[in-house]
Image: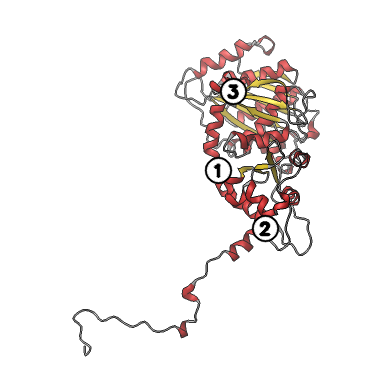
């Protein structure tokens, strides 16, 4: 079992998220804890008001809501409602929420069985429940005890915990007309917005467009643009806008332009430590006497988990390039890495013959299905034996760029002795 705990400012939003899932037919309400009436008689208003009245006892607690996800191994698809409710009750007791009002929902929108629990951090006496490090402390202890007592698959057997986040994007890209638009966009946004480090809307779209989605401000003369609004759209296989756009404010996570602008500032610092990895990878591929043409560069970058989004004018000339590093989850416009990584410089480094390629070549490169969740231990450059692995690149460049220590160039014995300076007023005979 894998647990995910998130806190929030709005109990309305968390409750509506789960209730909307029920309306869409991809979730069911399973039961409640510490409510005064039977589960069958619980209306949405009763569910909400019970929690609102208790959170009102301490208005100083701004992040007053709790959203918990308990995720089970795919082999445990047959867990009964009674067993899931027993697990939920036991878990809430063990993490210190046993006396809190809470609601339990089972979702069916992922490849593994999981339940969501909605609760609040304010006790009946108005005191606040401290959730600092609750995921590492109380939750981990509870998880291990529950796995043993209920005979569940231990979390340690899973290769990556992130596979069980509240909603992970599917491996296949979103196809307009095959998946309910809002749910498909939500699944992608929940992963990309939180995991990738982008500093502008074009950089964010460099990732989203690989899943046939884009964030759109509209034209400069539109009302959406004037009001600093933001729309999310599905794109067809040719990259054209398809279907009705959805306002950012209509999504549960509220991925508005204001929200993104705050992310841009945070990500500027968060991605700095990862610039060298992208620059080194590009430099190493272009290193050597044999010229590397642009298509080959893009292909070899892709092997190392770096996809490229290329921008061309109507004549097919390349004027912009963005690098999406799926290992570090960082997005860099070419100029953000440095002048020598811009579209113009990359073309020059690849040779003048690469300056203009047809649009079809770029479209194939930008729409590959290979948007894998890269792991730094999984990717190996499969080239000839004369090419060093990319993993050794940092060490090689560090040695090549290491400044020489001039003072140590000659052995100590061959260095001349320094002549002592005479102090002022001191005679030679002293």
Q: Is residue 135 above or below residue 374?
A: above
Q: Quadrant of the N terminus?
A: top right
Pick the front one: 133 or 206: 206
Residue at screen point 56% across, 49% down: 273
- On screen, residue 372 versus residue 92, left or right, reads right
Give the color scheme: rainbow, by chain, secondary structure or one colour. Answer: secondary structure
Which numbered disc, 3 or 1, marks the residue that appears first in the sequence? 3
Residue ID for mark 2 = 284
Q: Which mark is residue 119?
A: 3
Residue ID for mark 1 = 270
Q: Quadrant of the C terminus?
A: bottom left
Pick the front one: 294 or 47: 294
Which numbered disc, 2 or 3, marks the residue that appears first in the sequence? 3
| Residue 329 location (% of width, % of height) | 64, 42
- On screen, residue 127 versus residue 203, left or right, reads left
| Residue 362 location (% of width, % of height) | 74, 41
Asked whether the residues under the numbered discs 2 and 3 touch, taking CB atoms below 8 Å apart as contact, a structural biologist would say no
């Amino acid at each position: 079992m894998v647990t995910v705990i998130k806190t929030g400012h709005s109990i309305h939003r968390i409750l509506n998220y789960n209730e909307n899932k029920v309306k869409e037919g991809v979730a069911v309400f399973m039961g409640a804890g510490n409510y005064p009436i039977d589960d069958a008689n619980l209306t949405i208003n009763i569910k909400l008001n019970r929690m609102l009245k208790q959170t009102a006892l301490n208005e100083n607690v701004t992040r007053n809501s709790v959203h918990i996800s308990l995720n089970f191994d795919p082999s445990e698809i047959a867990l009964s409602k009674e067993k899931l409710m027993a697990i939920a009750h036991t878990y809430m007791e063990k993490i210190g929420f046993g006396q809190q009002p809470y609601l339990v929902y089972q979702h069916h929108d992922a490849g593994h069985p999981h339940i969501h629990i909605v609760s609040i951090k304010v006790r009946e006496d108005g005191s606040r429940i401290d959730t600092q490090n609750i995921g590492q402390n109380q939750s981990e202890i509870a998880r291990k005890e529950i796995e043993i007592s209920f005979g569940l698959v231990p979390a340690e057997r899973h290769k990556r915990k992130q596979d069980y986040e509240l909603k992970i994007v599917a491996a296949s890209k979103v196809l307009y007309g095959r998946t309910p638009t809002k749910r498909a966009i939500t699944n992608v946004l929940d992963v990309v917005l939180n995991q990738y480090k982008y500093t502008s809307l074009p950089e964010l779209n460099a990732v989203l467009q690989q899943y046939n989605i884009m964030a759109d401000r509209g034209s400069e003369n539109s009302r959406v643009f004037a009001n600093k609004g933001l729309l999310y759209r599905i794109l067809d296989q040719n990259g054209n806008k398809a279907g009705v756009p959805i306002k950012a404010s209509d999504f549960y996570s509220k991925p508005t332009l204001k929200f993104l602008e705050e992310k841009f500032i945070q990500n500027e610092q968060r991605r700095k430590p990862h610039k060298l990895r992208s620059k080194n990878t590009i430099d190493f591929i272009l290193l050597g006497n044999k010229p590397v043409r642009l298509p080959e560069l893009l292909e070899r970058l892709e092997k190392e988990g770096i996809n490229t989004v290329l921008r061309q004018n109507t004549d097919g000339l390349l004027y912009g390039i963005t690098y999406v590093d799926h290992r570090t989850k960082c997005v860099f416009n070419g100029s953000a890495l440095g002048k020598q990584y811009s579209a113009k410089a990359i073309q020059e480094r690849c040779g003048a013959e690469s300056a203009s390629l047809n649009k079809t070549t770029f479209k194939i490169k930008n729409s590959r299905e290979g948007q894998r969740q890269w792991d730094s231990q999984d990717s190996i450059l499969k080239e000839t034996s004369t090419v060093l692995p990319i993993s050794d690149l940092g060490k090689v460049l560090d040695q090549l760029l290491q400044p020489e220590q001039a003072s140590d160039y000659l052995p100590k014995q061959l260095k001349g002795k320094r002549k002592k300076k005479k102090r002022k007023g001191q005679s030679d005979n002293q």
